Amino acid sequence: ASVSRLPLSLKMISFIHFNYHLKGASGVELEKYIPSISNRSENPNTLFHFWYFLLAPTLCYQLEYPRSPRIRIRFLLRRLFEVVFCIILGTVIIQQYILIIVKNTMPYFNNLTGESCVRVFQRMLRLAVPSLCCWLLFFYGYFHAYLNLVGEVLRFGDRGFYKAWWNSRHVEEYWRLWNIPVHKWMIRHLYTPVRNLGYSRSKGVFAAFLFSAIAHEILISIPCRRFMWCGFLMMLLQLPLCVFSKAMVEKLKVRRVWGNWLFWISFCIFGQPLGILLYAGSMKDPL
């Protein structure tokens, strides 16, 4: 439930924020909000605009979106098949690999000694490959297949849901590229308002990461029924890692492949595997 409610909350914030600025807009600024509506003295919002926005694969509200000319049935069926395939294969990986590794790791959390910590680290390395495969299936199934499926049904023309994050030169670039709808929402409704208040770029970036850390903790802790703040802290630790990896590539002129390696190591080993084991180890009956 928390996974579906968070995007809905972000949509509502965008709807309120957009109409708050629309109410006080005039002249050229008003044309930016409603470029093709002749009578700008009346409220242009309709129930159609609102419901289309709720269903559309975007988090940023506006009165007009790019529209595709028609619905492509073959494209629609391919995306539907990919969604089903990713769900089935992801479930198989979770049941046959991830749950077994996690279950075999739980006894080591009962008595954490030097040897048990080494065993936990070994299990974390073993968990890296299946958790990465599962995450990639989720990414493809949701961001490529499902969002394109919904976009095709609604003839939604803006299909830029992600960019080539796997080639990221550093960690900051990954966070800008992997989830374009959330990135656009952050820029429009969090980063830009913070900058407009007179704060620096670094404070705007910190506000975005702080909000993202809270959101990650909510998404993880509510299904686990336990607040450990691991997701919150691990997300905030991404901020110094972003600064370090970006400086390493852009200021120290280290080859970009090293920045890409740093991203993949932090992503595959100290990302999902560590988080899975920490939250599973804190639960009395994780499986």
Image (cartoon, helix red, strand yellow):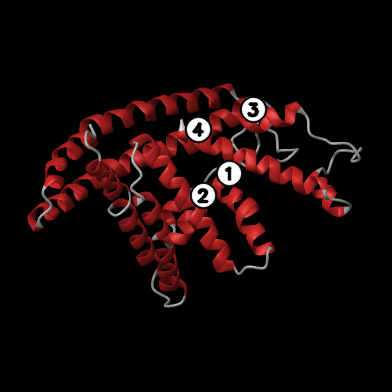
Q: Nearer the viewer, mark 2 or mark 4?
A: 4
Q: Which residue is mark 2?
A: 163
The answer to whether 265 is drawn above or below residue 46 in the figure is below
Residue extending furthest bottom?
A: 252
Q: Is residue 270 left or right of residue 120?
A: right
- In the rendered structure, which amino acid carries the disc numbered 1? Gly
Q: Position of residue 285 (x, y in %)?
A: 22, 33
Q: Nearer the viewer, mark 4 or mark 1?
A: 4
Mark closest to the chain's N terminus, 2 or 4? 4
Q: Pick whichever of labels 4 and 1 is earlier in the sequence.
A: 4
Q: Nearer the viewer, residue 81 or 63?
A: 63
Task: Mark 3: give few (<14), some (14-19) or many (20+) Cα within 10 Å.
Answer: some
Q: Badge 4 local density, few (<14 within 10 Å), some, or many (20+)? A: few
Label 2 to label 3: alpha-carbon separation: 22 Å
Residue 88 position by quadrant: top left
Q: Secondary structure at mark 1?
A: loop
Q: For mark 1, what is the residue?
A: 160
Residue under numbered circle 4:
4
Kind of residue indicated by mark 3: Leu
Q: Are marks 4 and 1 in contact (CB under 8 Å)?
A: no
Asked which secondary structure carries label 3, the reply is: loop
Residue beneath label 3, please?
154
Contact, CB < 8 Å: mark 1 with mark 2?
A: yes
State the image coordinates of residue 76 (x, y, percent, origin top left).
54, 25
Q: Amino acid at mark 4?
A: Ser
